[in-house]
Image: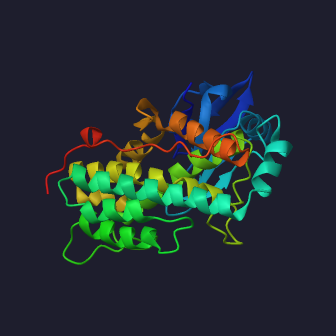
Amino acid sequence: MIKRTLYFGNPAYLHKEKLQLKVDFPSEEGKSAKTIPIEDIGILILDHPRITISQALLADLIDHNAAILSCDSHHLPAGLFMPMSANHTFTEKLRFQLESSEPLRKNLWQQTVKSKIENQAQVLKGIGKEASNMENWASKVRSGDPDNYEGRAAANYWVKLIESDFPFRRGRYEDVPNNLLNYGYAILRAIVARSLVASGMLPAVGIHHRNKYNPFCLADDIMEPYRPFVDLLVLDIVENFDTKDIEVLSPAIKRELLALPTIDVYIDDMKSPLMVGMQRTTASLMQCYEGERRKIAYPKIQIGNVKPRSV
């Protein structure tokens, strides 16, 4: 069953009552209390300085493997609170991850980069852009990507994907729609991290990312082929909303981006919501660590499912 993503952008008191998340609002808000079964919650997003949450609720959310995102003063996800373990054989599985060989990790990164570039190429083709060089680069990615085809593809991809008077620069503090991309990627990262823990892995130990200050290196690895799904969502928003709404990341825009866990993805021609597909991806990664399979089950964007965009 797909879990729910809950967003709170107003003052509220969140606490546990009879296995439910109960939301009480300040009297001046004039809203009635609401309850949601804790077991239905996958991601909880807190985006207001006057939100209070009880320890009993936090403990139960963690016990049900929910991810809790805390937003900063700019309303962007800034912190992620996760279970330390959510798999009954966590220690055994963690050993497989930590003792994985360098050739295996390089092979897994090769698969990841290849899948990401292929999906980026499909996005470009879906909006009528030429992508033969991207497809060529995807076919040439070697173990560990020593030729940095990921970087080459990214430079080519962004210039073609976002048309503007100046070449588009992808970055955390760059111009719109970077704010939308940042928000979408933060949601995606939470989905990946939650699923990695459920599959028995430690999100801090990556196959490629190794930044000592980053506790989500593996999440940042595995989310790469999924990023183009966020890009598609952002393209659709840019096309259908006013510029002023996009610049301030309005509630309507956030609602669009929070639909990310429910959008359809295809893995081995089987359709499922992204959050469910992610569970297949992380389970397959664990099987690679355990020596039970050689390929990570990544989704493939199919051109017929890419929304056309007027350019």
Work out whether 176 lies above or below 24: below
Left or right of residue 88: residue 229: left
Q: Out of 238 and 97, give the one closest to the viewer.
A: 97
Question: Given the current orientation, which residue lies at the most extreme bottom position?
Answer: 166
Decide which of 247, 86 is in the foreground and name it: 86
**Can residue 79 be seen by looking at this rendering?**
yes
Q: Nearer the viewer, residue 47 or 266?
A: 266
Q: Of all residues shown, which one is farthest toward the top?
A: 18
Identify the image quadrant of the C terminus. bottom left
Image position of 40 (left or right of 92): left
Q: Position of residue 198 (x, y in %)?
A: 70, 39
Outermost left residue: 310
Q: Residue at x 53, y 42 (%)?
A: 297
Q: How is the image coloured?
A: rainbow
* Location of residue 217 (image quadrant): bottom right
Residue at the (27%, 43%) spot, across then down: 303
Q: Is residue 75 visible?
A: no
Q: Residue at x 49, y 63 (%)?
A: 74
User: Where is residue 93 drawn, in percent x and y?
Assistant: 79, 44
Give residue 163's quadrant in the image: bottom left
Q: Quadrant of residue 79?
A: bottom right
Along the horizontal axis of the image, is 125 left or right of 199? left
Q: Quadrant of the N terminus?
A: top right
Nearer to us in this view, 69 or 219: 219
| Image-based side of 274 in relation to 160, left or right | right
Q: Is residue 150 above or below residue 75?
A: below
Q: Is residue 121 above or below residue 166?
A: above
Measured from the top left, where is residue 207 in percent x and y?
Answer: 65, 61
Q: Position of residue 48 (x, y in %)?
A: 56, 52
